[in-house]
Amino acid sequence: MAPVAVVVVGSGVVGLTTALCLQRSGRYSVTVVARDVPGLGDSASQAWASPYAGANWRPYAALGDTQQRAAEEETYFCLRDIAACQPWAGVRVATMRDFGAGPKEERVPPFLGYVRNLKPIARSEWPAHAWYGYSYDSLVVNVPQHLLWLRRELCGLGGAVRQGELADIRSAPGLAGVQAAAVVNCAGLGSRALGVNDAAMFPTRGQTLLVRAPAVDYTTTAPAARNDRAAYVIPRGDGTVIIGGVFEQGSADPDEHAETTEEILRSCIALCPQLLDRGPEHLQRPEQVPERDVERLRQRVIRTSVGFRPSRKGGPRLEVQRVGGLLVLHNYGHSSLGYQSSWGYAAAAVRLLDAALFAQARL
Ligand SMILES: Cc1cc2nc3c(=O)[nH]c(=O)nc-3n(C[C@H](O)[C@H](O)[C@H](O)COP(=O)(O)OP(=O)(O)OC[C@H]3O[C@@H](n4cnc5c(N)ncnc54)[C@H](O)[C@@H]3O)c2cc1C
């Protein structure tokens, strides 16, 4: 059977991973259309989320959220394989020092049972507000490198990527220049328009700093006093490290906030003394970090970035819908979790499209 033509709208991590899984299946011939494309055009555009991520694998799914948990678990194994077999793809195994919050988060983290090298961290090393502390093998993604790899991998298998902006999802096949059997919507925050008009979508503002800190050899995350704050440290494997951050729901403010930068510097030095080439005996509370240390790390800042996570009330949307005569498969709204669940949702999207296009009615 000849592959069926489909168009994927969006070339962030979700669009490209979904496109790659569809193309790899052999059942589809994929054209991606997107306004923002890795390696093409304005890399500093704040109109999409993917270039702004850390990114590490650190599941946030609640124990009861079985769809998200499955996606994170599947992505863990996919990213681990990529790290082992295709080191040029921008994915590495790194030790995670994971401190979870409470009381909303469960004391038993959902990844227990499948992450490698899981060990409890001694309570004496827990930062304030932590309800548990574990170290384990996580994955860190060098975001610019990984997005380019996804695009090249897709094109290497015969898929295509076209740059262009759509006003309506129904014009995607025309822009792609193909007679498509279906359109896959991975437009993130773009799904507030495009004729999809999803009013449940909203931005969650993030602010991060890229710093030079070659001594950092693990990734870590810890809760803060406020729900819209956390401290996280993600080495990119090239001597630079992303530190953050904030989760400001509903904020679309594109500018850097100086007080947030200050907070990030202080909380990350407290959590990860390696940022200043020091050992774990220098773990401390943010309020104990001396001003001169904040200044030392400030000198190592390469840039500050503000990006917007594509959040959705009720969680990600993965479902098939008929829009006029067009079959549309939605896969968007991944908020803070787009990288760490990318492969799981992409595989589920392929199964849904198979069912929508090829399933025979059985009596
Ligand atoms: C500061 C920060 C830190 C993060 N850290 C992590 C992390 O550590 N781990 C993790 O898993 N996730 C992390 N995330 C979340 C992650 O970045 C997102 O979940 C992910 O990038 C969403 O990808 P996406 O492909 O759905 O959307 P996007 O990257 O926003 O891509 C949307 C695509 O749709 C296209 N598009 C939209 N509208 C139109 C239109 N009208 N016409 C044509 N094209 C259109 C865009 O051009 C783009 O190509 C972080 C995010 C931020 C901001």
Image (cartoon, rainbow, N blue to C red):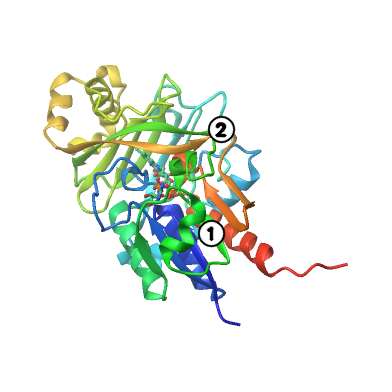
Give the class, few, some or many, for how many residues have Cα within 10 Å of label 2's Cα (few <14, many ≥20): few
Give the left or right position of residue 155, taking residue 118 as reference.
left
Compared to 347, does 3 lie above or below? below
As shown in the figure, which amino acid type bears the numbered disc 2? Lys
Residue 178 vertical position relative to residue 291 in the rendered view, above or below: below
* Residue at position x 42%, y 32% in the image: 204
Corner quadrant of residue 225: top left
CA gap, disc 2 to disc 1? 23 Å
Disc 2 on helix, strand or loop? loop
- Of all residues, the one furthest to the right in this rendering is 363
Q: Nearer the viewer, mark 2 or mark 1?
A: 1
The reply to whether callout 2 and callout 1 are in contact (CB within 8 Å) is no
Q: Residue furthest top?
A: 287
Residue at screen point 63% across, 40% down? 65
Position of residue 135 measured from the top left corner of the image (x, y, whole percent): 44, 43
Location of mark 2 (residue): 313
Give me the disc on residue 218.
Answer: none
Depth check, front residue: 199 or 231: 199
Q: Secondary structure at mark 1?
A: strand
Query: Where is the N terminus found, in terms of image quarters?
Result: bottom right
Percent of width and height locating residue 339: 43, 50
Tell whether 269 sits left or right of 245: left
* Circle 1 crowding by C-alpha within 10 Å: few under 14, some 14–19, many from 20: many
The residue singled out by tag 1 in the image is 183
341 or 254, nearer to the observer: 254
